[in-house]
Amino acid sequence: MAKQTKNYTDSMAELEDILSQIENEELDVDALTEKVKRASELIRSCKDKLQKTDAEVQKILDEIDN
């Protein structure tokens, strides 16, 4: 089962670490596959958090305008 991160900042830090490892060619093929899968999960999680935050902010701004 994939490790869960608790917040957006942790997810982004882990993504940056994975990207660094890929860019520096620090991973063998097997590890690369797992890291890309993990990066995909993190990206999906961050995207979801950003969409939820955007919706909440928009709701607050709409309430201010009324």
Image (cartoon, grey):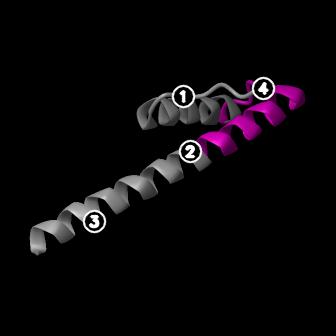
Q: Which residues are magenta?
A: 23-43
* In the foreground, 27 or 60: 60
Compare marks 2 and 1 and give the one earlier in the sequence. Answer: 1
Q: In what quadrant of the picture does the N terminus appear?
A: top right
Label 1, secondary structure: give it.
loop
Q: Is residue 17 left or right of residue 64?
A: right
- Residue at mark 3 to residue at mark 2: CA–CA distance: 20 Å
Label 3, secondary structure: give it.
helix
Q: Residue at x 63, y 31 (%)?
A: 18
- Label 1, residues with CA under 10 Å away: few <14, some 14-19, many ≥20: few
- Label 2, residues with CA under 10 Å away: few <14, some 14-19, many ≥20: some
Q: Is residue 51 left or right of residue 65?
A: right
| Viewer-nearest of discs 2 and 4 | 2
* Dot 2 and dot 4 residues touching (CB under 8 Å): no
| Viewer-nearest of discs 1 and 4 | 1
* Dot 1 and dot 3 residues touching (CB under 8 Å): no
* Dot 3 and dot 2 residues touching (CB under 8 Å): no
Circle 2 residue: 45
Circle 1 residue: 5
Compare marks 2 and 4 and give the one earlier in the sequence. Answer: 4
Residue type at tag 1: Thr
The numbered dot on residue 58 is 3
The numbered dot on residue 27 is 4
Q: Residue at x 49, y 36 (%)?
A: 12
